[in-house]
Amino acid sequence: MGKTIKIIKTITFIIIALQVALAAVFSVLYFNNFFDFQSITKPEYIAIAMIIVIAVNCLFVWIIILILSSLRQKTDLKAAEIIGSDVQEAYNFAQIGLAITDEENVVLWTNDLFKSRHIEIMDMDIIAWQPDLAALRDTANGDQTAKIVVNSRTYSVKLLSEAGLWIFKDITDYESVYNYSKDQAPVVGILAIDNYDDVVRGDDDFNDVVTKVKTDIFGYAKDYGILLRRLKDDSYSMLCNYASFSKMLEDKFSIIDKVRGESTRGEIPLTLSIGLAHDFPDVNKLNDLANDALDIAMSRGGDQVVVSAYGQEMKFYGGKSEAQEKRNRVKTRVLADSLISLINASDRVLIMGHAMMDMDAFGACLGMKAICNRLKKHARIVVDLKNTEFKTRSAMTSSFGKEELEKLIINSKEAEDQINGNTLLIVVDVHIPNMVMAPRLIDKAAKIVVIDHHRRAEEYIDSPVFNHIDPAASSTCELISEFIRFSSINPKIDLPSTYATIMLSGIFLDSSYFKSRNTGIRTFEAATILKEYGADNSLADDFLKDDYEEHKEVTDIVTNLETPFYGVVIAIANQERLYDHATIAKAANLCLSFKGVHAAFVIGKVSNREIRISARSDGTVNVSLLTEKLGGGGHFTSAAATFATSDVKEVKNALISVLETSLTEASNKGLMKNGEEE
């Protein structure tokens, strides 16, 4: 039909052109009286000629109408062959619309549904009318459908490409039911008040700040249609529908910021940790998911909302505050004794840190080795020297003799051969499976212990038998030092001075010599514990000293500073060189020492196929939240992300994109691009 219409258009154009040309020739001859034309042309001849032209035009139009009617009839017959002549009433009852198009997507025929709903699309390009239908024309999958909205009604559209038949099914009623069901779907949550026990002493539940916080919580619940039930003094269960949850999402859980603002300067801040779960019909399962989400929120330092949709990745909101230091020696003793019980119940212990092991990871491993030695358990530290930082390798070789080192460490391949069902695997200073020294050990181990001080990421070692993540601690060596000192075992654990020195070096490293904001009283107490065991602070400092070449590398990196946002700097290392992880981290620390810099990001190649971002903050910006959006993570003021690429520009653009969209969210002061603070 489309070809026939093109032919008709061409013939029509030719006839009109001929008539115009004849009229022009006649006018020239008549008005200029060429060849005495006026004398041989009489008015009656002109009238007869005009009548003939009009008659020919009418006949032509009539013939075209007959041709088009015949083509329409043939199209109707073709459609009838496709859907069957007896289903006309059926598809009217089912509110199904049909449209046939030619090879160029021009609509040739529609059924009565379109006419009854005043949808005029005849002779129109159906793709131009509804661009969302282009996917159906472009795909080879005949089962694919598209959803469109026309005149406030929703249609599901399918294409039978061979016949050029478009099937429109009215699903407005189904969509209404679906949307209603979705809005009424249950959302279960658990809310906990962080630092409640530290603020409320004894039975004094009428603290002014606590009263304000609880008033805010109940007011928020009332405004958003949330059913609250108290579980304990510091926690509540939450129940609402998805419509209320959507409003909270749009509001970005403002209750988090409001509660944080209730604490005045000098007080221990009260914040909220909330775990929410949805997208599953069983409320018991949702309650389990909400509990898991709350655990993650609290292990990441609190002051945030973690949303768990069944079968999907968790989403994080808030997290602008640093984890608050908690000095609870009773809890530390309970944790240490639980860990000792697990070690006693095992035949063999393997200890490992993260890939590119630094002094904090190695020191924590040594601390755990000392505990195992006290319990007379066979224990080895899993170390691949090529996957260890240079300074850590130097500390190993200078602190231990060859025979002593052979009894201390084991490579990953030998560890895989030795592991069995009663082997305890202790993972320190890391909790992300693909970042450990030997990822295959995670899959083989039946019992795993996780001890870390980084904010918990969504990706996590599955089902550890012992889990202690404390983002308020400055380092993992700090946590292990507390376990050694406050455990109930008698006689006490003996920590060799060599071990203590390396652990002190780990604390120096991760606390930036006690200058980082996450350095607390516990950090100094841990250093005191290690000094009592004979730690040499001068030697611990020597382990971390740079040689001239490394110092030069750091200063060269810092010379390439850029300031894309107020208070935020980015430095790009030489793209032609490979750098050690520690070098990039030191460059970030040096950038942070400059006045007016609140956050620093250093980008450098650590291998031919890997680029690393090292991020540091003075506490104004949550760099962990930012690096998590890049696939990394870490601590509130110290984090990193790694990219499997060799394109530094690509990594920089990704970082800039995250800063543009999330810097305000991650900042307590709302750092702006134009050099002004909100």
Image (cartoon, rainbow, N blue to C red):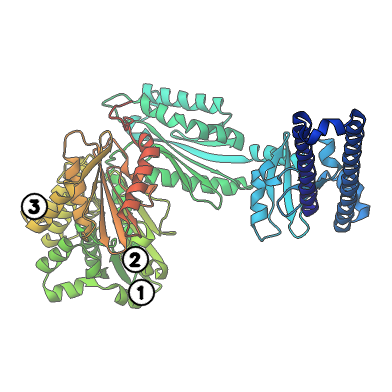
In this image, 339 relative to 541: left or right? right
Residue 353 percent across, percent down from the top left = 28, 61
Q: Quadrant of residue 384?
A: bottom left
The front one of 534 and 258 is: 258
Q: On screen, 533 above or below 220? A: below
Residue at the location (42% across, 55% down)?
A: 459
Amino acid at dot 1: Ile
Say which residue label 2 marks: 425
Q: In which quarter of the image is residue 518?
A: top left
Q: Which mark is residue 537?
A: 3
The front one of 546 and 324 is: 546
Q: On screen, 55 above or below 78? A: above
Q: In which quarter of the image is residue 583?
A: bottom left
Residue at the location (58% across, 36% down)?
A: 239
Residue 385 percent across, percent down from the top left = 22, 69
Say which residue label 1 marks: 419
Amino acid at dot 2: Leu
Can residue 241 be seen here? The reply is no
**Mark before the other along the chain sequence, 1 or 3:** 1
